[in-house]
Image (cartoon, helix red, strand yellow):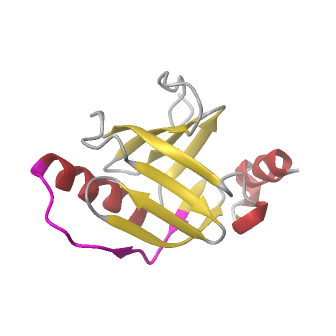
Amino acid sequence: MRSSLLALCLLPPLAACSVQGEDSPLARTTWRFALIDGQRPDSADARLTFEGSKVGVQVGCNRMDGPWRIDAERLIAGPLALTEMTCTVPAWDQEKAVNALLVATPRFAIDGNHMILQSSGHTAELVREGGPMERPTRTADGS
């Protein structure tokens, strides 16, 4: 049922399709950041978690969370609340990049245990918790 719903939402004529919560293929999943703008995350704990109607993001030393939904091939997250603890420069830069990525309603593509989030300025490659660490073979724009 979930894969059928995702397939329906990815069809271009159904751009108004919006899915959230338990009906989404992202519901109750956790994704580990493999790359943020082409760089390995500074923190091994960098995660994106979808639980109910909330998304939780941990990249460096701060957390973001807020509501989320899928609209066509876009992930819409926010408004996001963000803690503001002091981080090392690499972690802080990656947090800013992920925040900008999520605010930009990124395109997303899932291929097995791999997901790519892509906006005009930032890209993140993620691996579903428990999945293999290989890099995705497909980008968010399908190439």
At horizontal 45% and vertical 70% (from top left) the residue drawn is: 65
Asked if residue 9 is among those painted magenta in the image, a careful observer would answer: no
Q: Nearer the viewer, residue 3 or 48?
A: 48
Q: Give residue 83's position: percent from left, percent from top.
A: 29, 73
Say above or below: 41 vs 94.
Answer: above
Q: Give residue 37's position: percent from left, percent from top.
A: 30, 40
Q: Give residue 84's position: percent from left, percent from top.
A: 22, 72
Start-end of magenta stretch: 76-89
Say above or below: 51 vs 140.
Answer: below
At horizontal 51% and vertical 27% (from top left) the residue drawn is: 136
Which picture quadrant has residue 21? bottom right
Is there any visible trace of residue 21 in the rendered image? yes
Look at the magenta stretch and give its main secondary structure. Answer: loop
**Residue 110 shown left or right of residue 65 in the figure:** right
At horizontal 64% and vertical 62% (from top left) the residue drawn is: 70
Asked if residue 77 is among those painted magenta in the image, a careful observer would answer: yes
Which picture quadrant has residue 18? bottom right
Q: Nearer the viewer, residue 139 or 30?
A: 30
Q: Give residue 92's position: percent from left, percent from top.
A: 18, 56
Is there any visible trace of residue 17 in the rendered image? no
Say above or below: 18 vs 119.
Answer: below
Say above or below: 77 vs 121.
Answer: below
Which picture quadrant has residue 102? bottom left
**Residue 82 shown left or right of residue 90 in the figure:** right
